[in-house]
Amino acid sequence: MRLNRRRDHLECGLTLLEVLAALLISGIFLLTAMRLFTDQWRGAHALKNHLEAHYAVMTAGKTVSDAIRMSETASWADPGVLKVLPLADDSNPQPRLDSYFIDDLDGDGRKDLYWSHAEMPQPVASCMIGWKCAEVEPGLWEIFLQANVNGQIVTWQTLIRRRVFYPAS
């Protein structure tokens, strides 16, 4: 018995095996591409969090450094409060005692560094988890700040000297 095949008949279409092989290859390619895209997204997200934490400690560090550098007096209270009396100048002829502290006054679950001026606290930097200011020697201050943004922990530390320092006589 002869099968119904003719030599002049052209094959029109793909076999099931060819379709399955093409789907398997396409699926492997798509899985690899998705993995690369998600890895890139995770890396970008971690970098964003690291940069946010870095920006928070840099902003807080600059603000606190400038406050100490331009202060008449500065003192560190034990529960984590820095008290600063700014120098008198034309814009501030009778300065008031300012304080810097970490708290969650806005109730968002993240602690922020606040600057309290005239009993009105204002946020300086967010996501702060720790800080310490210590007078290493008269007029020389060490500042340590730490921020955490979604697991990305960044620390910042510096030594600064007050511009106006009156040693004890």
Image (cartoon, helix red, strand yellow):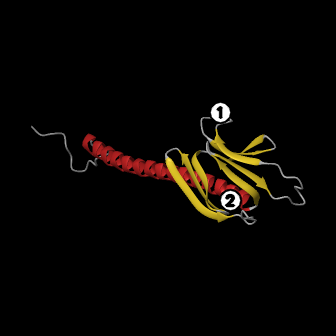
Structural crowding at the residue carrying mark 1, measured as other residues with C-alpha within 10 Å and reported as few (<14), some (14–19) or many (≥20): few
In the image, 75 versus 21, the foreground residue is 75
Q: Measuring 76% from the left and 58% from the top, which residue is drawn there?
A: 71
Question: In this figure, which residue is indicated by the disc labeled 2?
Answer: 65
**Res. 107 mark:** 1
The image quarter containing residue 14 is: top left
Residue 105 in percent (x, y) is at 68, 36
Q: Measuring 42% from the left and 52% from the top, which residue is drawn there?
A: 36
Residue 98 in percent (x, y) is at 76, 48
Mark 1 vs mark 2: give the one in front: 2
Q: Is residue 129 left or right of residue 117?
A: left
Residue 129 in percent (x, y) is at 56, 45
In the image, 31 versus 79, the foreground residue is 79
| Label 1 vs 2, first from the N-terminus | 2
Residue 14 shows in this picture:
no
In the image, 93 versus 40, the foreground residue is 93
Q: Quadrant of the N terminus?
A: top left
Farthest front residue in view: 169
Q: Is residue 136 left or right of residue 29?
A: right
Q: Is residue 100 left or right of residue 1?
A: right
**Secondary structure under the numbered disc 1 in the rendered image:** loop
Amino acid at pointer 1: Gly
Q: Is residue 60 left or right of residue 3?
A: right
Q: CA distance from mark 1 to mark 2?
A: 27 Å
Residue 102 shows in this picture:
yes
